[in-house]
Amino acid sequence: MTAPFRTGLAALAALSLTTPPVLAQTSSEPTAASADPMIGTGGEGHTFPGAVAPFGMIQLSPDTDTTCQIRKCYSHAAGYRYEDPTIQGFSMTHFSGAGHSDLGDFLIQPVSGDTVGLEPDDYRSPFDHATEQAVPGYYAVTLAKPGVRAEMTAGTRVGVQRYTFPAGKAAHLLFDLRSSLYNYPGKILWSSIRIRADGTITGARETRGWAPARKLFFAIRPSRQITGHAFLDREKKVEYRGFQGPSRGADDAQQLAGRELVARFDFGQIDGPLEVKVAISAVDEDGAIANLDSEPGNFDAVRAATGKAWDQALGAVELEGPAPMKKMVATALYHSLIAPSVFSDADGRWRGPDDQVHQASNFTFHSTFSLWDTFRAEHPLLLLTQSEKKNADFVNSLIASQQVSPFGILPVWQFNGRETWTMIGYHAVPVIADAYMKGIRGFDPNAALDAMVKSATYGPYGGLDQYMKLGYVPIDKEPEAASKTVEYAYDDWAIARMAKAMGKADIAAPFEARAGNWRNSFDVKTGFLRARKADGTYRTPFDPTAINYGSDYTEGNAWQYSWFVPQDQAGMFKLLGGDAAAVKKLDAMFDFDNSKLDYSHAEDIAGLIGQYIHGNEPSHHVAYLYSYAGQPWRTQERLKQIVESQYKPTPDGLSGNDDLGQMSAWFVFTALGFYPVAPGSNEYVIGRPFLDRATLNLPNGKRFAIVAEGLSDTNKYVGKVLLNGKPLARGYLKHDEIIAGGELRFTMSAKPNKSWATGKAVRPYSMSTAPR
Amino acid sequence: MTAPFRTGLAALAALSLTTPPVLAQTSSEPTAASADPMIGTGGEGHTFPGAVAPFGMIQLSPDTDTTCQIRKCYSHAAGYRYEDPTIQGFSMTHFSGAGHSDLGDFLIQPVSGDTVGLEPDDYRSPFDHATEQAVPGYYAVTLAKPGVRAEMTAGTRVGVQRYTFPAGKAAHLLFDLRSSLYNYPGKILWSSIRIRADGTITGARETRGWAPARKLFFAIRPSRQITGHAFLDREKKVEYRGFQGPSRGADDAQQLAGRELVARFDFGQIDGPLEVKVAISAVDEDGAIANLDSEPGNFDAVRAATGKAWDQALGAVELEGPAPMKKMVATALYHSLIAPSVFSDADGRWRGPDDQVHQASNFTFHSTFSLWDTFRAEHPLLLLTQSEKKNADFVNSLIASQQVSPFGILPVWQFNGRETWTMIGYHAVPVIADAYMKGIRGFDPNAALDAMVKSATYGPYGGLDQYMKLGYVPIDKEPEAASKTVEYAYDDWAIARMAKAMGKADIAAPFEARAGNWRNSFDVKTGFLRARKADGTYRTPFDPTAINYGSDYTEGNAWQYSWFVPQDQAGMFKLLGGDAAAVKKLDAMFDFDNSKLDYSHAEDIAGLIGQYIHGNEPSHHVAYLYSYAGQPWRTQERLKQIVESQYKPTPDGLSGNDDLGQMSAWFVFTALGFYPVAPGSNEYVIGRPFLDRATLNLPNGKRFAIVAEGLSDTNKYVGKVLLNGKPLARGYLKHDEIIAGGELRFTMSAKPNKSWATGKAVRPYSMSTAPR
């Protein structure tokens, strides 16, 4: 469990910032200049500090330790951990903020001098954070042991390393095919390496990690002549049974295959830096080589191109406000633009969930879909910051995956094209529905709806057969049944929304009915969502504070999960006994005395405020729910409490895993002043802004500014709201109002405005009371 | 070591044949009708009895035991062993007569009734040879345990199984992805299986056997609806480290991946047979499906098409003579037409020695090149029996392999596109040179010559760097140095021959010089080829009868290897002291008392006549060498001795591994009456015929008949020889004389003709004395 965070603004002050963050200080710097990739690399963030282009296929980043044992793996999910004193090498694939992990493919470490040890403890090097530099698309550090300055940059499908060796010492590269994140004995199923006639090093690795039997190919091209090399297999010799003679003619120096390979490349004493251009492919070695060639240029050229790409991508939101807040928001925006990652090769080929190679036409296939996390705010944020083409790419990738899935369903948690079956729900559904509802085209809506319906009706998946029969997932048939029931119901609502918008009432009707299924697992007597058995009774004993794997809930308990009815929060409040009861229960959640609870056995349970757990996703929309009860000022209070306690502009600045951008997307939306509680509704619940001014440069070319007049630590309430100069009485904003461009102007106040947005007619969408 | 063979004709008589084989009995039956795939399935033959089309990609054959332990593997190299009482199942890939083995991919076994055991001992079934039927392209047997009639047939890229289940019992198929030939713990690196929406079962397996990390994909389509199935992983659960919760939603029934998979398919009680059409691909599952679809039709249709293909292929040689001899020759011809196997998919894609997928244009890629064996007589036989296109396919496959080889050299022992580095030499070189010299075009001779030169000058391979420096391979640097030196020298001569024919004297010259390198390892003092050290001295102690792995020789000793100078046998005889000395030494070899020697530690050493070892290749040309000394009648005597002791028309009828057709090709040539001692010379040394009449239907449409007038057990010598009616004074035949069509007429005699073909001018090619 996370160490308790120092309270927000106090913590900022403790960082000895020259300007107290309470003072509004604006700046005309581009947003990219404020982003700091080091945020989240310590604590529980699980982000990586290395070089990546926006949605880049390849992530060149230092791994401080890949020799993790079972318990240490979790803390090293991104390879790099700020607290570690040494760097083991630089690998090419990393997740940004994942809980579970994998990747860390193809680790290279520079070594200088005459002796090159082959084991991690031989070649790992101490480093000093003072030598590190990390900006979007560029990372550098000095490795003390070999005396090498190591720099990383990355394009969309290429990475370039630049190593400057000390004068008078021989330069080597150590390439360790045994290294991997979340490694364990037997993870490397097979690997191979060779040097081609033109000096390009290619090979492949097949690993048995989070994704089963994941294949990845590499191409590596050094800028200098290789003067010597060695390929070694460190595995105890496995003899082919039946061949009793000596190997006749096998030439291990030219090509080697095995399970514990390590290679050494020598360059002699060199003047000036050694550049190493690298690429990967899930298709084949030719694909990796073609990817390598698809983005020409040396280190500086790739760095410049990617720097420009980041300037443009981060320019989607211009920021004005105190430097620490700008830094936090800019970094959050940066973290929201890393995944889903480009995954198809330059020629459009990609390897799918069926482990077969397919050809993408008219779209770029993306993978790394952490959908249980990202359907909430990450994908909605991308709809405001990325082009229609990019968002259509995401949808097309999901549809293409479904079409070749052996199960015929949309991805659940997909990376490198493979299904990991991690987390629950069919949340590709709201991602697609939200995109469609917000006007994204460039994909086949009929194919999309077909994929969504198939995913929602595939009986063998996660108790869906029972859910369709009983109207809820029964806990005696399927674990985590309560969470599944409510998440399925929301996804069903998303299908109904899109089907209705497409004029397909016959499809919409049954799913609109299913959208009410959350009621079937909601125990009015206790006021909690609870798991029911197939016979209709609730499972006992019932402890709303218990968190266990395989329990009634998914990475959470009744306190967090009872609120998950984004499609009908007002309906849920009714079951609780009305608005007052809902507010009381919300307060009970936030103010819960958790001092006697211990959740250290459960990963991902971090960032606690009472029973509100900001470090994990089920809580993310809960602070906004006061507004559904007509008390938006309570939402405003809670948001301040969360922002100040859960985010910091420091390496340990994230209270939980960033989860491929979801933690960050929450922060970007919240800082802007609104949040998409129910993706698919085309509404954003208004919270309160945390920046003096922010301007969205929308994909359609229009600009939407959010201004917070008089914002300060004491002016923490929304006094009034003007949209394009006219008072906005509603507690929510419509998507069309944003994309039309204009200005949302808050006037902040030291006192809550208890008459604004309180009436039922001006509250956010709920299907049963405010259907819209 | 092989049990001693009963002497030939006595053995034939002991088989209770109705007609004594000494009587010439002709027949007008097609050759295919005489072929018996059971020959070689016992003893040391290592052939398989199952169904295969000529050069077919897929070989459907019963495996009697794949659970071999280390010592038993060798005897089960082809999966089936005649002596075994049970059949474990029917797999799709088999070698014909290989020593070392692998394959046995994708084993299916029919099971009837209500209980389906998953272990080999549960599902293996006894069988009776009386129920077996094996003809080219078709195999059938009755499995006693399930009461199932099992039939196999195969096209070029499809196989069809037909199972007739007993009435009233449920029909099942057991599919065991753990099963493999030459299996051992850890051989299966990964495997997967799934059922597609249309009922096609697809999947893949990656094995670590003779070839490293060999990938093979399958597609299986039953003719009846699958009513139920199960996919099971029998491996002790390997947990992904870091994922501590339960698997959420993984659907093992739809798709499974792992290392110890077994599947069960249920069909219920069925009327009539169940057909199972199967295909494989080294490229991907789509390739396997496309291969499956490339040859339409049910069992009977495929069987008929393949029967026709065999009639045509075996019709290349029409046979007249005693039935047992016809059977032996027809079967030998059959065994010579199985490899090299088609390996590219129907769409032309193939996986190469670099483990990457390539596209063949204008040729069909073949693999399974057992070149150390097959350069001798198998490929020369294919040049007489197969089309120019087919032979060009072989050459193009070799060139294509070289062009994508990580080592830049031609295949050594290649199967499934992968290099195994088994045996020695660069014998793709004489295969290509012989084809070119005999007029095969349809490939790029410049690319071929380039590939040959590269293979002969690649220093890291088999001591070539030392060979090029010293003129011989030094034993203190490289094992089996003596054998390597003489085989390299012959291959070098083949390069010189082809380069000269192409008008490239500059390339020919250095290789012609290298062709004399055998002299550098020939110890005139002892009269034996011996291994020398880098300092020029011969290694001691020297025992010409010793056979050990990693010794001075490859699967042999000084007795066999001293004779390997096909390009200059006369030159070698000179070093021995002349013709008389050579004959004396040949006799000493054949008449050697080996009763006190034990070679049981060495595989492949079988079929001994003194120190002549017919069961392995180095001896194969030796009986023909008397003719080089002007004593062709001694060759005639030795051939009778070998044929009668080493071949029988019975399951144990081969004295050694058939080695992908080489043992058989020796027999076909010898039965015809001539043999290609030096491929590349365009000459065949005349032996003596064993058939009353044989007619070659040549690829160019012409016919060449060989008639043996008065052939009988006593008329065992060649009296006179007429070519197209004119006396042939030479002891050899020219290739052009055969392909021009015509008749070679022997008059057999009870006494040797000691005046025919004795003079130096009429002896076969030797580069130093009869260069031609």
Image (tube, coloured by chain):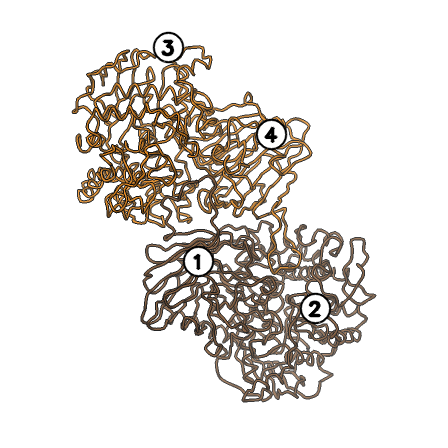
Chain colours: A brown, B orange
The quarter of the picture where residue A163 lies is bottom left
Q: Secondary structure at mark 1?
A: strand
**Relative horizontal placement of residue B582, taking residue B26 as reference (left or right):** left
Q: CA distance from mark 3 to mark 2?
A: 94 Å
Residue corresponding to mark 2: A599
Measured in 3D between alpha carbons, the distance from the residue under mark 2 to the one under mark 1, in whole angstroms, is 40 Å
Q: Nearer the viewer, residue B659 or A125?
A: A125
Label 3 CA crowd tier, 10 Å (few <14, some 14–19, many 20+): some
Q: Secondary structure at mark 4?
A: strand
Q: Can you tell which mark lies on residue B370?
A: none
Callout 4, which amino acid? Ser
Q: Disc 4 vs disc 3: Cβ atoms closer than 8 Å?
A: no
Instruction: Output the chain of dot 1.
Output: A
Q: Which residue is mark 1?
A: A262
Location of mark 3 (residue): B23
Marks 4 and 3 share the same chain: yes
Q: Amino acid at mark 3?
A: Leu
**Of B1 and B687, the residue lying toward us:** B1
Identify the element where label 2 is drawn. Answer: loop
Residue B532 image position (x, y, % from top left):
27, 42
- Of marks 4 and 3, which one's residue comes earlier in the chain? 3
The amino acid beneath tag 2 is Tyr
Distance (Cα) linking label 4 and label 3: 42 Å
Q: Chain of mark 2?
A: A
Q: What residue is pinned by disc 4?
A: B125
